Image (tube, rainbow, N blue to C red):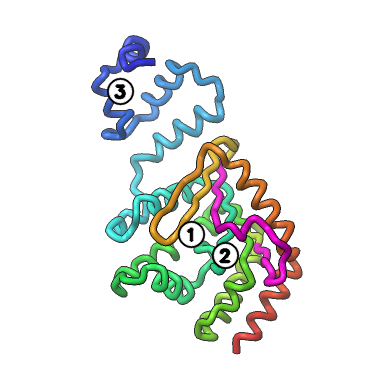
Amino acid sequence: MTLEDVERSTGFTTAKLSRIETARVATKPVDVEQLLRCYSLEDEGMAQALTALAREGSKRGWWEPYRDVLSAVYADLISLEADASEWRAYYPLLVPGLLQTPAYARAMIGAINMTSPQATVNRLVEVRMGRQSVLTRDTPLEVWAVVPEAALRMKLPEPIMRDQCQRLLDLSELPNINVQLMPLDATPHPGVSGGFAMLAFPEQQDMDVVLLENLTTSLYIEEDVDPYRGAFSRLQAAALPFEESLQRISNLKEGHK
């Protein structure tokens, strides 16, 4: 449909439609509802989800004061986590950010942001800790993380690694958090090609998002998420079962003395 077609159907001016479509103005829920009728959207769940996004879009997130140190992709991730119902992640050699202690996060952020001043690193650590509020909100995020054993054997001060192991053990006691350990002697699995995080949203599988990250760039995958669902299932199968994972993490903790 052209802008003119939609103008005739909705009564919106082409100028208003153009500003909405180019994200130069916030979209009101009532406008979204009218546009969805115009576009003959029949999926009621999708309609509700899009209207809810419009309703929440005008609210400022807790992360807004940190915009000066956040990339656009990172800010989007925090916003997505706030709306998501499920979060699954695997990163080679790294404990996922939502499960990190402040000291471990500071070491990892400092290593990745090689030239950033300490003040920037500190603010990024604050952001990472702030993100973890989704784990204990009224309707907590359902988390399933596959943590590589190598991440818990990294050469860091013993107190940092001991506390990080204990953090994983503590979080595993929450009903919404599942942690599996990928052992060093695991069979080959899709994680050897790189890590990813996958977010799912209530009642809308076709809105799932995968985030891929490397040193200089990040990329969201929205159109072809199924391969990542399959990959994560294979990661779960290759990792240790829950009880064995927790016992191995406990043993690793005792080794950091």
For residue 166, what is the image quadrant?
bottom right
Q: CA distance from mark 1 to mark 2?
A: 24 Å
Q: Is residue 83 left or right of residue 20?
A: right
- Label 1 sits on residue: 133
Q: Is residue 49 left or right of residue 169?
A: left
For residue 145, what is the image quadrant?
bottom right
**Residue 59 magenta-highlighted:** no
Q: CA distance from mark 1 to mark 3?
A: 36 Å
- Label 3 sits on residue: 17
Residue type of the residue flagged with mark 3 = Leu
Residue placed at 57% from the left, 65% from the top?
A: 92
The answer to the question of whether label 1 and label 2 lie on touching residues, with beta carbons closer than 8 A, is: no
- Magenta extent: 179-201
Residue placed at 45% from the left, 59% from the top?
A: 214
Can you say whether 241 is above or below 228 in the image? below
Residue type of the residue flagged with mark 2 = Pro
User: Disc 3 on helix, strand or loop?
Assistant: helix
The answer to the question of whether label 3 and label 2 lie on touching residues, with beta carbons closer than 8 A, is: no
- Label 2 sits on residue: 92
Q: Residues within 10 Å of mark 3 (few under 14, many from 20)?
A: many
Q: Could you say which is closer to the camera, residue 255 or residue 238? A: 238
Residue placed at 50% from the left, 20% from the top?
A: 41
Mark toward the start of the polypeptide (1 vs 3):
3
For residue 250, what is the image quadrant?
bottom right
**Residue 183 magenta-highlighted:** yes
Look at the image and tell me in which quarter the C terminus lies: bottom right
Q: In the image, residue 154 lies at what x, y percent?
A: 55, 78
Look at the image and tell me in which quarter the N terminus lies: top left
For the residues carrying marks 3 and 2, which lies nearer the camera in this image?
A: 2
Q: Which mark identifies residue 168?
A: none
Q: Residue furthest left?
A: 15
Q: In the image, residue 133 lies at what x, y percent?
A: 48, 59
